Each structure stands twice: as structure tokens, then as C-alpha cells.
Image (spheres, grey):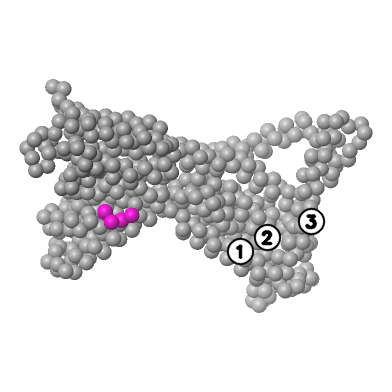
Amino acid sequence: MANAYALAASYMMAITIVPVLANFFISKESMPAEGTIELTESMSSGKRIWARVANVFIGGVDWLGRQYAVLIGWALRNRLLVVVFAALLLFFGLFLFGQRPVQFLPNFGEPTITVTVALPSTFPDSDEPLTIAWTDAKVSRLEEWVQEQAGVETVQATVGTAGGFGVTDGSVNETSASLSITMQDQATLDALLEPLREQAEAIFNDVDNDGQPDVDQEIGQSFVSVSGAGQAGGGFGGFSVVVQGVEGEEQPTLPDLAVYNETILSTLTDVDGLVNVELESEFVGETTYIRIDGIPALRYVAELETDDTIGVSNEAILAVQEAIDDLRGSNPSYVPVEVTQGFESEEQERGIADIFTSMAIATLIAYLLLTLTFGNPLLPIEILVSLPLAIVGAAVALTITDRVVGLPALIGLLMLVGIVLTNAIVFLDRVKANRKQGMVRNEALREAGLTRLRPILMTATTTITAQLPLAASTESGAIIAAELGTVVVGGLISSTLLTLLVLPVIYSLFDSGVGTAGRLLGFGKKTSQEASVPSAGD
């Protein structure tokens, strides 16, 4: 919505304020002549320096114009080759997009690891109570180890929590603790996660405090969680899966569902990128009994420690379904169940699907507006050909910068729908005007290319330059803008360069096709202009 208001305001400025300011500050006499600036003796040193710099740019644009004229001629003589080349680039771009990890939203804020401790009230296999002193000693040992690691910026520990809701006597849960570790960057966070998990397990399994973990203890594995996934068990970064009865079948009871529990937990634990899915955990990875439309169901949540959150979520759901099918194959008496996405995973996929729907709607609206403007249903199709060409640069840019395909990147693609069409409209509008003046097709294309090359390059260059600081952002809080800017910059570069090459060819192919169809159907006859148009092999 903000973009729409900004564009509307920009349009009003362009048709009202800009002409008035131009009339005040630019007179006909002050307009420079076409071509390079002539250096004279009367010029000051500053003006001479400026003239030399300007002449370099003017000369560069003139050189580009001459080379582009040659390129258009070659492209119009080798139309099939150009179309095949563009198609191969498009498939290459789609391939690169398919290789990128898919993530709804990146983690926000500073890279942070959270260690959560929720110990039982007594030692396992013993009635001896766990005290806050024992918990604090373990947390202190872990805290000292963390502070010795590279890339750690701050460590904040909390031992003991309030006893719960409604507690007025000041009681404290002596077996709960948390450790918040701020890391220098995401790379150091990723490198520390597994060693930290191993160290936490070893420390909390050392029940006797003799420096050696007890081999028969699993306190660290069962009651200590190490998370580097940002939001866990919910929100934009969470994973959840629901197992429930099949619609139309006899609905299971909770005990019927419980027979699948061990298999599901084991399967989820084996999925790379999913962590903290142990049944015993009280804070994450727990099994929750729920009802959906009155049907009993099991809900599993876990944390995603991967860039490819959507891909790993889908992989986990498929793995659980296959494991359940295998289990039922060997136990036919088990009630049939189905595996579906939980709320978190479903919302992420729905958000991405909504962006693609918005792109389709934006493209359709653009087509309708262009059809009404040009009075021709075919010309807008030629203009819209420039849209897929933006995918190539966007995919290459994301690959080079090693960024994910997520909501920010897809919003960047949505923005490109409007930005990219501008260059194609400017080009083909000139071609249409040239044809009305009697130019043959290829002459009209060459003249439009030479005339529109400068404004097209200026528009693309200024937009790319404005987006570069955004695309180059590396701060954690600016990562969303960085992904969006990366897509816009890459998409504009590829669409501008390929549009200048491919669009004349597409126009000529449509023109030839319409002319041929008209002659075959008897709707028209070959004119002298059409007779002078060289074929694709000329």
C-alpha cells in the first residue's frame, strides 16, 4: 500500500511540479546541443573539468548506441537463436531458484543461542531433591565454558524461576534455569551449537560433580535444550506436524494415537535441521494432545535450525507419513491416521502462496491496463515477456550472495512486475509510433532501440544504484531489506540487458505471425512495407 501511495504521489509530481520547475530553471537557450561538449578558452577550469567528465559519459553512451544498433541487426537476423538463448537462461534461472533454500522469514535481531534447563524435582532413580545450589553449579560450569569460546559477545544466566501463577509466598523453582548467549554472527552461532549441546549434556550428566559424566545418566539429553533457531515451537520460525484420524473413517481415541508416538518422535529426530523433539522435554519438542473439529489428534512441535525451513518441514512431514504407513503395514490393527501440517508450517506455506497469487493478479491487471492503453491485446503480451527475464538476474544474485528465497525475496519479485514493465513499455511505445509514421518493422525497431537506449539505461541504473545500499546490508536487523534489494538489483540488470536484446525479436516474431495468419485467413494482404521486412535468416 505504501508503494502505491508513493508511486501515485510521484506521478502527480511528474505531471505538475516538474514541468513548472523546468520552465523556471531551464530555458531553450540554455539547453546544450546534442553530442559532446565543446571545450573553449573562455571556460573556467571547473567547467572544463566538468565538460571532460561529461564527454566521457556522452562518448560511452554513443559507443553503446552504435554497438546496440549492430546487436539489434544481428538479433533480428538470428531470431530463433536469440529465443533459444533466452529460454535457456530462463530455465537456468528457475534451476538456481530451485536450489536456493526456502525460508518464510529470516531470524530477527542478533544471533542468539538459548539454553533452557527444566530439571525434575529429584534426581533420577532417587528421592533426593535437586537444589538450586546444584542447578547453579551446573549452569556456572556451562557459563564458564561458553565464555571461553570464540565469537561469544555476551552471556546472561538466570537460575531459579518464580513458582508459577498465583504464587504469593515467594517460592522459587530451584531446578529451572536459562542461559542467553549473544554471538558475533550467524557463522559463529552455527559452529558453536553442536559443541554446546555436547558440553551441556556432559555437565548435567555429571551428577556426582567429579568432572566425569555418569554413563547411565541422561539428564542433559532429557531436560536441557539448546536452541539457535530464534523462534521455536511457534511463530514464523516454528515447525509443527499434526497426526489425526482419517476423515470418513472411525475416529481414533488418544490411546489409539499413542501407539504411533515413539515412531514419530524417532522419525522427526532423524530429520536433518530439526532439533529438540524429545518426548520428555517440557518446553519444546513435546507431544500435545489436541482436538481438531472434535477429532483427537497429536501435535508435535520442534525447532528448525536450517535456512531451508520450508523444505525441511515438508521433508519431515513426508518422513512421518512414510514411517506411519510402514508401521501400519506390519500392524494392520492400528487405526488409520493422516499427517498434516501444523498451524506454524501451514501459515508459512500459505504466506508464500499468497505472494505468488499477488504476482499473478498484478500481471493480469498490468495486461488489462496495457490492452486498454494500446488498444491491442497482443502488444501487452510482448511487453510482459520481459517479466520472466528478471528471474534470471534475481536467481543469480541470490546465489552469489548466498541468500534464501523467502518472503522478502518474493516481495522483491512482486516489485519487479511494475519496475521491469516500464522499460518494455518505453521501447515498444516508440516502435508503435515509428510504424504509424510509415517505417518498416526492422527500421522501426532499430530507431526505437537507439532512441530509447539512453532513458532505459538511465532508469535502470538509477534504480539499481538506489537499491545497492539495501542489497549490501549485512546487519541482522536489515537482512529482510537486503534480500529484497538483492532480488531487485539482480532482476533489473538481467531484465534490462535481455529486454534490449529479446524484445525486438519477440515483437518481430509476433508481427510476422500476425501478418502470416492474416494472409492465410484472408484478413489482409501483403503490403509493400511487409514485403521489405527481412526474414529471420536474412
Q: Which mark is residue 86?
A: 1
3D distance between C-alphas at marks 3 and 1: 23 Å
- Look at the image and tell me in which quarter the C terminus lies: bottom right
Q: Position of residue 23 (x, y in %)?
A: 77, 33
Q: In the rendered view, would you say 518 is above or below 23?
A: below
Residue lying at 39% horizontally and 45% vertically, measured from the top left: 191
Q: Which mark is residue 66?
A: 3
3D distance between C-alphas at marks 3 and 2: 14 Å
Badge 1 or badge 2: first in the primary sequence: 1
Q: The residue under label 3 is which amino acid type?
A: Arg
Q: The residue under label 2 is which amino acid type?
A: Leu
Residue lying at 77% horizontally and 61% vertically, measured from the top left: 70
3D distance between C-alphas at marks 1 and 2: 9 Å
Give the labeled residue for mark 2: 501
Residue 144 lies left or right of residue 104; in this view the side is left
Q: Position of residue 249 (x, y in %)?
A: 17, 63
Q: In the rendered view, would you say 148 is above or below 305?
A: above
Residue lying at 54% horizontally and 62% vertically, measured from the top left: 92
Badge 3 or badge 1: first in the primary sequence: 3
Q: The residue under label 1 is which amino acid type?
A: Ala
**Res 17 quadrant in image:** top right
Q: Is residue 340 visible in the rendered structure shown here?
A: no
**Res 141 quadrant in image:** top left
Q: In the rendered view, would you say 301 is above or below 115?
A: below
- In this view, the residue in front, 179 or 333, is 179
Q: Which residues are magenta?
A: 268-272
Residue 457 lies left or right of residue 178; in this view the side is right
* Count of labels in the image: 3
Badge 3 or badge 2: first in the primary sequence: 3
Q: Position of residue 24 (x, y in %)?
A: 77, 30
Residue lying at 42% horizontally and 52% vertically, measured from the top left: 102
